[in-house]
Image: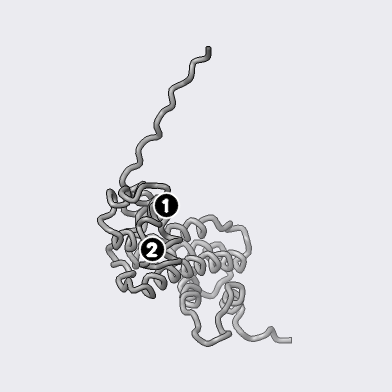
């Protein structure tokens, strides 16, 4: 007869970990249903009982605010920007950065739009509202956790500046100025039909202008 090793229980989640897990499960549902999503749907997606949600969140409105804060959280895109290889050509680095940042903006816009369209007009969080990871004090990159819109923007500018820095000697402007221009072009989406630039087109205009080379 063989002895069986007693199974050990997994360590209990902290409040912050459980909140983050619930928000991760809720985000796709909020993007799809907006404020009409129910806590029952969220609980099923998270694989937990509905009562567990209310042990870490005061009410559904707090869950929705946490989802908006997570959608705005720049830590995900900062990880991607930090992973771009600096030995690639500058244009390739900036195209990758543009794709990552546009995906971040699309995600944020989808969640905010779904909440607003479903009547949740307090979707935007205050500058002082921390993202879940920042509230837990866990940096998601090699940087400190980012808290607040101004700090978020500064972290993104710094990350893009790093991507430009290796080409400093062949550029007419300081890397930080180029990063600011790049982000300004990326964040200002044209409302004219057919005029929105792809990341490749945007980088081409930034680095080479709009004139064809002289023949």
Colour scheme in the image?
A: one colour
Q: Position of residue 10 (x, y in %)?
A: 40, 34
Q: Is residue 157 visible?
A: no
Q: CA distance from mark 1 to mark 2?
A: 12 Å
In the displayed structure image, the side of residue 58 where residue 80 appears, left or right = right
Q: Is residue 89 left or right of residue 3?
A: right
On-image quarter of the C terminus: bottom right
| Residue occupying the far front of the picture | 40
Q: In x, y percent, where is residue 27? A: 42, 60
The one of 67 and 159 positioned closer to us in this rendering: 67
Looking at the image, the residue that sits furthest to the left is 58
Residue ID for mark 1: 44
Residue 107 screen position, x and y as percent: 46, 66
Residue 186 vertical position relative to residue 72 in the rendered view, above or below? below
Structural crowding at the residue carrying mark 2, measured as other residues with C-alpha within 10 Å and reported as few (<14), some (14–19) or many (≥20): some
Residue 169: image quadrant is bottom right
Q: Residue 152: x and y, percent?
A: 38, 64
- Of pointers 1 and 2, the one earlier in the residue sequence: 2
- Numbered label attached to residue 138: none
Query: In this figure, which residue is indicated by the disc labeled 2?
Result: 37
Residue pushed farthest right? 215
Circle 2: element type: loop
Outermost residue to the top: 1
Query: Measuring 54% from the left and 69% from the top, which residue is drawn there?
Result: 98
At horizontal 53% and vertical 63% (from top left) the residue drawn is 163
Around disc 1, counting alpha carbons within 10 Å, would you say few (fewer than 14), some (14 to 19), or many (20 or more)? few
- Quick check: can you spot residue 200? yes
């Amino acid at each position: 007869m063989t002895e069986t090793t007693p199974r050990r229980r997994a360590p209990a989640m902290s409040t912050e970990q459980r909140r983050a897990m619930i928000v991760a499960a809720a985000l796709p549902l909020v993007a799809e249903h907006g404020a009409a999503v129910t806590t029952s749907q969220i609980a099923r997606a998270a694989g937990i009982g509905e009562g567990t949600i209310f042990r870490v969140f005061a009410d559904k409105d707090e869950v929705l605010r946490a989802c908006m804060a997570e959608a705005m959280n720049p830590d995900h895109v900062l990880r991607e920007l930090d992973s771009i290889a600096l030995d690639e050509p500058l244009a390739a680095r900036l195209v990758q950065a543009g794709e990552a940042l546009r995906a971040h903006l699309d995600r944020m816009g989808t969640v905010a739009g779904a909440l607003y369209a479903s009547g949740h007009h307090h979707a935007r969080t205050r500058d002082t509202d921390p993202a879940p990871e920042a509230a837990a004090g866990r940096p998601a990159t090699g940087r400190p956790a980012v808290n607040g819109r101004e700090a978020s923007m500064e972290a993104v500018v710094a990350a893009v500046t790093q991507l430009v820095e290796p080409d400093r000697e062949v550029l007419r402007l300081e890397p930080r100025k180029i990063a600011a221009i790049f982000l300004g072009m990326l964040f200002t989406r044209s409302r004219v039909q057919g005029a929105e630039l792809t990341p490749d087109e945007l980088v081409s205009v930034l680095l080479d202008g709009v004139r064809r080379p002289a023949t």
